[in-house]
Each structure stands twice: as structure tokens, then as C-alpha cells.
Image (cartoon, grey):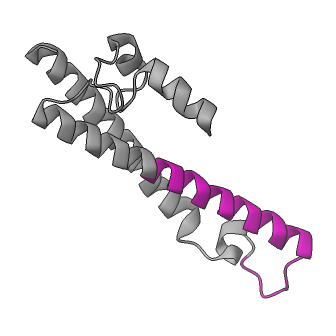
Amino acid sequence: MNKNESKEFKNKLVELRERITDDIRNKGKDTLSKSQREASGDLSAYAFHMADVASDSFEREMSWDRVSAEQKVLYHIDDALKRIESGSYGECETCKKKIKKERLKAIPYATLCRACKQKHEEQR
């Protein structure tokens, strides 16, 4: 991979990282930092209906799950940025062959070529 391509992928990864970080921050402000009462919009002193509490709890848990998944993607992005700096970006971790650029354009933090990823998925 030449320097221009590395720079292009680095810029793409940094942009993706910023977008995900902003998304996590917004979810934290909107949902995760509020109490159940604040999140539901009910600021009265009356008790919640059980169905409302369950629904709110489910939505909050879904938000936590999304944030957790996005945190994992951030880890992979950071790892990809380190690989760019070390010069190993675009190399399959399993077979050591080059990962096709089409795959890296679709998933810029990919660590496996398509064939190794497919084998990995089949073993799961």
C-alpha cells in the first residue's frame, strides 16, 4: 500500500472514529445520563405504570448495548490506526496476504481477508 492510500484510509478511520465518538457522547447525554423518570418525561411525583417502567428499561438497555458495540468498533479503529503507523495495515492477521482494497473501503478496520473471515465465521 502506498503512502497516498495509507493516508486516505487513515483519514477515513479518523473520520469514522469521530462520528462514533460523537454518537456515543450524544447517547450518553440523551439517554444514559438521565434517570428513568427524566428519560420517560414524567417528572410528577406519581408512581410509574409497570409497563412504562419495563419499556423504559428495555430502551435504556438497548442504548447500552449499542454503546458497547460502538466501543468495540472504536477499539478496532484504534488498532487499525496503529497498524497504519507500523506499516502492517491491510495485511490479513491469519494468512498474512493483502486484504483487498474493496474490503478495506467497506470495513476500514478489517483485520482478516474475506476468505479467512469466512472460515472464522464458519467455525463459530
Q: Please name whichever residue, 104 or 62, is drawn nearer the observer in this view of the structure.
A: 104
Residue positioned 28% across, 25% down in the render: 96
Q: In the rendered image, which quarter is residue 101 located in?
A: top left
Q: Please name whichever residue, 78 or 94, is drawn nearer the observer in this view of the structure.
A: 94
Q: Is 30 located above or below residue 8 in the figure?
A: below
- Where's residue 45, x and y in %? 78, 88
Q: In the rendered image, which quarter is residue 56 located in?
A: bottom right
The tally of labels here is 0
Residue positioned 49% across, 27% down in the render: 117
Q: Is residue 67 magenta?
A: yes
The residue lying furthest to the bottom in this view is 45
Q: Please name whichever residue, 116 or 10, is drawn nearer the observer in this view of the structure.
A: 116
- Where's residue 41, x and y in %? 71, 68
Residue 48 appears left or right of 99: right
Q: Is 73 located above or below residue 96 in the figure?
A: below
Q: Is 20 located above or below residue 120 in the figure?
A: below
Residue 40 appears left or right of 110: right
- Where's residue 3, x and y in %? 9, 17
Q: Please name whichever residue, 49 or 93, is drawn nearer the observer in this view of the structure.
A: 93
Residue 17 appears left or right of 9: right
Residue positioned 46% across, 19% down in the render: 114
Q: Is residue 1 magenta?
A: no
- Where's residue 1, x and y in %? 16, 15
Residue positioned 81% across, 63% down in the render: 55
Q: Quadrant of the C terminus?
A: top right
Q: In the rendered image, which quarter is residue 32 located in?
A: bottom right
Query: Chief secondary structure of the magenta span?
Result: helix
Residue 99 appears left or right of 81: right
Write the start and end of the magenta stretch as one range: 43-71
